[in-house]
Amino acid sequence: MRTLRLSLLIAGAAAIPGVALSQDAAPRTTDDYVCAFAGDCPDEEATQEEAPAPRAPGSPRVTATRGFSLSEPGTARPRRPATTQRRATGPIRTSAPRTPAAAQGQRVNLRLSFQSGSAKLTRAAEAEARVFAQSLLLPQLANMHFRIEGHTDSVGSRASNLSLSQRRAQSVADFLVAMGVARDRLEISGYGPDRPLPGTRASAGENRRVEAVRTS
């Protein structure tokens, strides 16, 4: 499940700027961004327990994956190790295995939408950007730097698209700074229609996007 969510995060099933985010798109969490940029991904499957096998009357119960022997009523029962989970406003500590640290150059489509023809974030986009900002303040990402990239499709003049992509990237960076992210951690680039997504036509709406790229 975690692998699937990470794949979707990196692939960037983006909402088209100027259009509200899809209602069936799962909201992202700080866990998702930490997993994508730092490689700190809880292995959810490893924490799930299998159903116990049939046992003889009077024999102790042992879980299939954890190996804890649960005593019969009236005797002391060993406690399972506690695990805390990260919420949108704080760090996480988990006993589950983690993947190796992600490399520099990792990019994520932020799935942000804008009012038509402008660099003003929609309310849905502000909610998405707020979670990203909270992620950048967590210890796992706090020392990293990012490039905020604006992209457009090829509809219209290249000059106007370059300007729009730059203004949208700047708008996102300004929002992150307002949420507490240090400005010197962010750089801004607007590429207009020059970098369409692989396998898409330059005029395709999917190319209207803002991406965050880890630079250090």
Image (cartoon, rainbow, N blue to C red):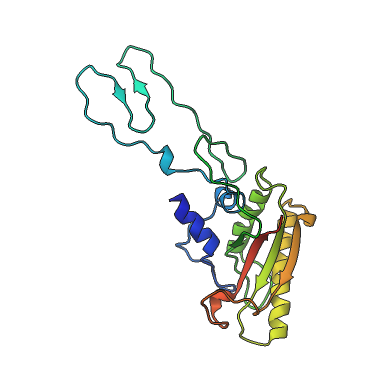
Residue at the left extreme, as displayed: 57
Residue beneath the point at 71% across and 79% down: 162
Compared to residue 60, the image places residue 187 above or below, namely below
Residue at the bottom extreme, as displayed: 157
Q: Position of residue 205 (x, y in %)?
A: 55, 78
Q: Nearer the viewer, residue 135 or 216?
A: 216
Q: Position of residue 69 (x, y in %)?
A: 35, 21
Quarter of the rendering containing residue 49: top left
Q: Is residue 80 left or right of residue 12?
A: left
Residue 172 visible in the picture: no
Q: Is residue 132 left or right of residue 179?
A: left
Quarter of the image where the C terminus is located: bottom right
Residue beneath the point at 63% across and 60% down: 126
Q: Nearer the viewer, residue 2 or 166?
A: 2
Q: Position of residue 76 (x, y in %)?
A: 38, 13
Q: Nearer the viewer, residue 9 or 127?
A: 9
Residue beneath the point at 34% across and 21% down: 70
